[in-house]
Amino acid sequence: MATPFDVDQVVHTITADLSAMLNKDITSFQGFAEDQLDQLAERAAHLSARVAAGQIDRDLANALAGEIADDAKTFAEVTAALVALEIEKVWNAVVNAIWGAINAAVSGAINAAFPIPKLPSAAPAG
């Protein structure tokens, strides 16, 4: 038997699911980000102090600065991957709730459920 499509319930389900998921994930990311950024800042402070004190030459300073830059890039790439994962989680929560409600509302009226759409792929950067 079909279940009426309850817009308010679907919206409530989505927002509650997203709120719980995002709060948990943001808390985890904050811990990760603080640890990584603290390490980068400590290394930069150490490098600055050694250069200012004349303890290392320009070539070594440039090499160490390059390593810090590489690690900053890696942090940015990991952060971007985590954001992409969050986008996929949001997509899944939204379409699962909406398509679940659609399929519940039309059950019995059609022979097959509407398939849940897949997250569109991002276009390659040009």
Image (cartoon, grey):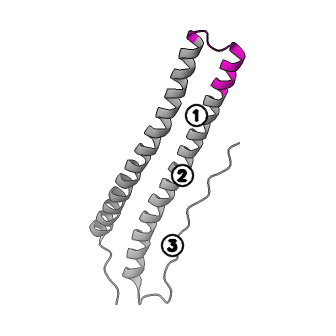
Identify residue type, mark 3: Ile
Q: Is residue 16 above or below residue 78?
A: below
- Left or right of residue 103, residue 58 in this image: right
Q: CA–CA distance between discs 3 and 2?
A: 19 Å
SS category of the residue bearing label 2: helix
Q: Quadrant of residue 121?
A: bottom right
Position of the N terminus, as image quadrant, is: bottom left
Q: Is residue 93 above or below residue 53?
A: below
Q: CA–CA distance between discs 1 and 2?
A: 18 Å
Picture coordinates of residue 120, whole percent (x, y): 59, 60
Range of the magenta residues?
A: 52-66
Which mark is drawn over residue 107? none
* Lower sequence index among marks 1 and 2: 1
Q: Can you identify the residue that label 1 sits on?
A: 72
Q: What residue is rendered at 42% in x and 79% in y?
A: 103
Picture coordinates of residue 116, whole percent (x, y): 51, 72
Task: Classify 10 Å Cα crowding around label 1: few (below 14), some (14-19), many (20 and above).
Answer: some
Q: CA–CA distance between discs 3 and 1?
A: 38 Å
Q: Nearer the viewer, residue 9 or 109?
A: 9
Q: Can you identify the residue that label 2 sits on?
A: 84
Disc 3 vs disc 1: Cβ atoms closer than 8 Å?
A: no
SS category of the residue bearing label 1: helix
Q: Quadrant of residue 7?
A: bottom left
- Left or right of residue 111, residue 74 in this image: right
Identify residue type, mark 2: Ala
Disc 1 vs disc 2: Cβ atoms closer than 8 Å?
A: no
* Lower sequence index among marks 3 and 2: 2
Q: What residue is rendered at 47% in x and 87% in y?
A: 110
Picture coordinates of residue 28, whole percent (x, y): 41, 50
